[in-house]
Image (cartoon, grey):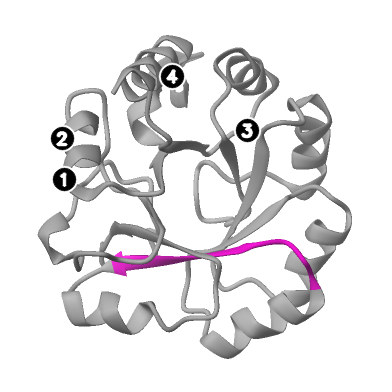
Amino acid sequence: MNNIKIKICGIRREEDISYINKYMPDYIGFIFYKKSFRYITPDKAAELKKLLNRDIMAVGVFVDETADNILKLCNDDIIDIVQLHGNESADFISYLKEHTDKPVIRAIRVRSTEQLIDAEKLPCDYLLLDTYTKGDTYGGTGKTFDRELIPSDYRPYFLAGGLNADNIKLAISECNPYAVDLSSSVESTHTIDGVSQTFKDENKIKEIINIIRAI
């Protein structure tokens, strides 16, 4: 068994929490970005956090949110870790670090090796490497990026971007990340009252976690 950590992002429902508590990934992600269909309100996240197994860490995912709003979620213990997925600066990270003891993850939408080398200097606890997409889509696209851009002997990071049951073993073998971040690959789309909706899928969560833990 390996020591790769597992994060399931985009948790929104009590059913999701039941799957999480059953298969026990290391982290979940609450997305507080209103333009995402996976958005969750702080009040709903607080309800779900109370149901979450205490051995699982809740990550709050933010895109250019105010420091005050982030720190309130930290201080209320709704989240255990901050993930910044927008254009937040090194100074912004430092400000958060000065005002909370919660770890900070900085997401990088990968475009070049030089970009990743520069990102190593950021004052965060971890980096999260994700696929770059134009516009205001931040993660959860199901698309991969060129992992050969990642420098060798890179600082501990979360690997995201199009990871699924078919490619997860190869990705871990090639990159040896600290953790893997999963979202769209553990979802299924259903039509409810004529409306197409996407939710977390228990069978997909079980399958990919079993694959990762068997490596």
Stretch in magenta: 100-109
- Choose the circle earlier in sequence order: 2 or 4: 2
Disc nearest the viewer among 3 and 1:
1
Residue 135 visible at all: no
Q: Do labels 1 and 2 touch, CB within 8 Å?
A: yes
Residue type at tag 2: Leu
Q: Residue at x 71, y 76 (%)?
A: 96
- Choose the circle earlier in sequence order: 3 or 2: 3
Q: Residue at x 29, y 48 (%)?
A: 161
Mark 3 highlights which residue? 12
Mark 4 highlights which residue? 205
In this view of the protein, which residue sits in the foreground, 214 or 25?
214
Residue type at tag 3: Arg
Mark 2 highlights which residue? 170
* Mark-to-mark CA distance, 3 and 1: 31 Å
Q: Do labels 3 and 4 touch, CB within 8 Å?
A: no
Residue 84 visible at all: yes
Q: Is residue 148 left or right of 175 when viewed as pictured?
A: left
Quadrant in the rendering for residue 24 = top right
Query: How many numbered dots are placed on residues in this image?
Result: 4
